[in-house]
Image (cartoon, rainbow, N blue to C red):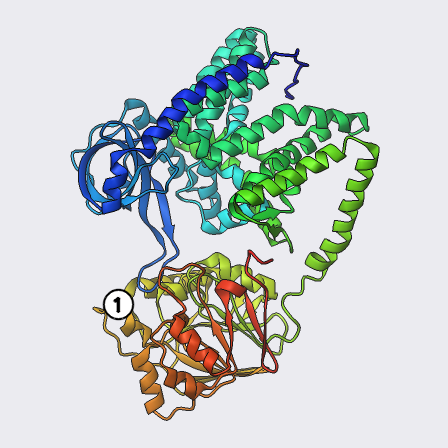
Amino acid sequence: MMVRVPARKPGSAWPLLACGVLALWPVGSRIHDAATDPLREAAARGAVVEWRAEIRERPRPVRSAGFGGMPAGVGSVVMTAEVGAGSDVLLIAPVDQWSRLLPGQVVSVRGTLAPATSGELVVALVRVRDPPRAVGPPPAWESVADSLRKGLRKASGVLDPESAGLLPAVVVGDKDGLSPTVVDEFRAGGLSHLLAVSGANLTVVCVAILLLLRLLRFGARSAAAGAMAGLVGFVVLAGPEPSVLRAGVMGAVGLLALAIGRERSAVPALGTATIVLVTVDPGMATALGFVLSVLATGALVLLVPRWADALTRRRVPRGVAEALAVPAAAYVITAPVVAGVHGQLSLVAILANLVAAPVVAPATVLGVLAAVVMPVWPWLAELLVRLAGPELDWVIAVGRFAADVPGATVGWPDGWWGGLLLAALVGGVALAWRSRRGRSLVTLGLVAVLVVVIPVRVLAPGWPPPGWAVVACDVGQGDAVVLATAEPGRAVVVDVGPEAGPVDDCLDRLGVDRVPAVILSHLHADHVGGLAGVLGGRSVGAVAVGAGRAPEWAWRQVRRAAAGAGVPVTELNAGKRLSWPGLDIEVLAANGKERTDDESGSAINNTSLVLRAATRAGRVLLTGDIELAAQADLLASDVDVSADVVKVPHHGSRTTSPQFLDAVGARVALVSVGAGNRYGHPSPRTVTALRDKGTRIVRTDTDGDSAVLPGPTARSRGSPGKR
């Protein structure tokens, strides 16, 4: 049902403007109080504090990619809490026990203060190590809502893992069980807004209730009252997130207008909702979800009716016109904010949303019904979830396809200037479109973009370069190296990075669908965590490991992933030779001696398999994470380590000896490292040693995926910010 915006009389916006000006007083006062809060000074000193704190929001999990002996996963949670005389702090706490807290609970907190970002309403960070003490009871309505959310998660377990994680996210914004791969794909495809509760969710729920009550012959006011009750219940179920509260207040004002016969009050309703919520909680003004939600709702109210009418006048069927106008308007109005925050633009977002939108509404309704009936009739909840399964599978498929489109995203300047630049560009196009000459210029510009960008970025993207022999994948802080065979689409993978998504994407870009062997140099998280990304959707011959079996959790994870894919696990020893057309690999070292009590991880690093591959680009030395001791052992053993290309040990850390680099004598050095990592990799000393030898250095943190070609020469795809 399209919202019609009436023509407004001159001056009708003055009351709304006056309310906005009056709202500046409490907002400004709150900002001043936060800026001058005494806790900021205590945080600068790193003071240890103990408080009674009231939890303000549901704990949000913080996912770690994993590194060394620490597995990937959720290790901590963050949540806002109120302490003292109304000061807001951000708690960073262990996931155990803290993740079970609910908004409104009061707990005793002991932790160490750290400075918060200046200009924010949160005045300090609190790093907590101990479990919460003297935990008070949560509000009754929060307990009920939490029980319903848990019931929905349990009922979703009848679906495949990805769909089971997506349903709670689509319905109530619960992303705890959502696959990181799906999150990345939705972001690239422009579907990430589906993972946050917004006005769209409330609209679906309220419209469903209104239609049901009108079918039962309830009057307009009674139907509006029933929808209002459903709205309140949904807000409680989803939780008091900024976008949920904004949508709730907006919906309440809109339903009130419907009940009194003024359906055309959408614009004042949006303004009223925004002003009231920012006045009550100024922090919402800086919440990305809240900003996007307000902008998207404004687009639906102001742009969609006009655009749909324009398309209808051009003989486009009304339903099709509205379906086209909604995602287009939402994307155009929110694109500057998204580009400024993420530094990229999705070129497929409008089409992806158009294709996914028809199934989102039924999936949302079925999910809400499942959550409501789960405590009474679990079998009915599971049936409703199964009915939502095909819709969720479709949305995942759309997001995956959109993310895989070559050139689906383009880099854009981030920050304020990037957002303002795109906003100015959108505004300029809108102004030009008002005149016939301007429309001609805009059309010519679009044609030029299609003629230039599509052939360059899509039809001939230039990656991978012809004749590539080796590619160091950009997988963040970890290793993943691909060795080409003479058969197109067939390659050996050495290490798989910390997460499944990046290595999967890298192999897709290379067109690799057959992997005769996945070789894991050692069992640290940043080398084995992405194994599922290689095994999924490809023909894999075997997973090969060295003699090391520590850490135990990683060994169990590798065996479990391989068994799930039906792939055997085999062990490699020194002297072993592996051959495929166009590729030979020799195991130079496979030290299985390890100490499980070594907290630094050096002992496990030194068990890394050391491989030398004969490729079309020459000899390539793959060193895993070997450190000084293992490097010295290799040199003392008189093993020939000379090579044309070297994968620098341990991400270029300072534990690489110049003598070892001298013995290798490589002309090209690959440094697989994550951008902005907290370990200081690569070490300036190692980089300087390589440069002094005249070695060409290629880094995945600055260059992205990096290929080695015959010569040897190197060519990089470019980091995300450079593409």
Name the quarter where the N terminus is drawn: top right
- Image quarter for residue 220? top right
Residue 25 rendering spot, x and y as whole percentages: 41, 20
Q: Which residue extends farthest bottom?
A: 638
Residue at 66% x, 13% y is 8
Residue 649 rendering spot, x and y as whole percentages: 40, 75
- Residue 203 visible (yes or no): yes
Q: Is residue 414 above or below residue 291?
A: below
Residue at 52% x, 37% y is 194
Residue 537 rendering spot, x and y as whole percentages: 54, 60
Instruction: Look at the numbered disc 1 and give the secondary structure of its residue.
Output: loop
Label 1, on which residue?
Answer: 600
Tell me if mark 1 has few (under 14), some (14-19) or many (20+) residues whose alpha carbon lies within 10 angstroms of its own: few
Of the pair 399 and 94, the residue shown nearer to us: 94
Q: Is residue 459 above or below residue 32?
A: below
Of the pair 127 and 258, the residue shown nearer to us: 127
